[in-house]
Image (cartoon, rainbow, N blue to C red):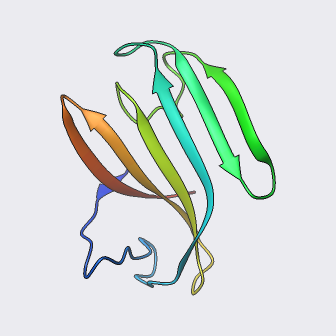
Amino acid sequence: MKAQPIEIEQGMVQCPNCGGGHLHQTEVMVHQRYGEDSNGVETRVSQDNGIARRQLAADDPRFEGRRDDVAVRLTCEQCLHHSRLIVMQHKGQTHVYMRLEE
């Protein structure tokens, strides 16, 4: 599913699948490029797997855009779907999106 801009009501993020508000954070992914549209590195942090780091090619689909991004993987308590809360930089602006995982 394509990432969709989100609206945050009263400081609460809702599940993009069912609209539920009971989401649990399961993993944090940081994608940093060495320059615009260049290769970079992914750092993942999770309770189950600890910290993992790997190099990424410029065209790797894990990059959300042309610059850096941070993604928080969420699991919905109601429908059990996984989604990502994504904060990314684009042309000097910061965008916040939700993406439902397939």
Q: Is residue 21 above or below residue 66?
A: below
Residue 98's spot in the image, x, y percent? 39, 59
At x 75%, y 58%, the residue is: 47
Left or right, 31 with respect to 4, comes to right
Q: Position of residue 58 (x, y in %)?
A: 49, 16
Where 34 falls versus 89 (above or below)?
above
Q: Quadrant of the N terminus?
A: bottom left
* Residue appearing at x 30%, y 53% in the figure: 96
Q: Quadrant of residue 19?
A: bottom left
Q: Compared with residue 71, is residue 19 higher up or lower down, i.e. above or below? A: below
Instruction: Judge by depth and name the residue closer to the eye, 45 or 58.
Output: 45
Identify the residue at image location x=44%, y=75%: 15
Q: Quadrant of residue 73?
A: bottom right
Which residue is situated farthest in the left direction here?
92
Q: Where's residue 28, x and y in %? A: 58, 50
Give the total of numbered labels.
0
Q: Position of residue 2 (x, y in %)?
A: 38, 50
The front one of 22 and 46 is 46
Residue shown at 56%/16% (left/top)?
57
Picture quarter with the C terminus: bottom right
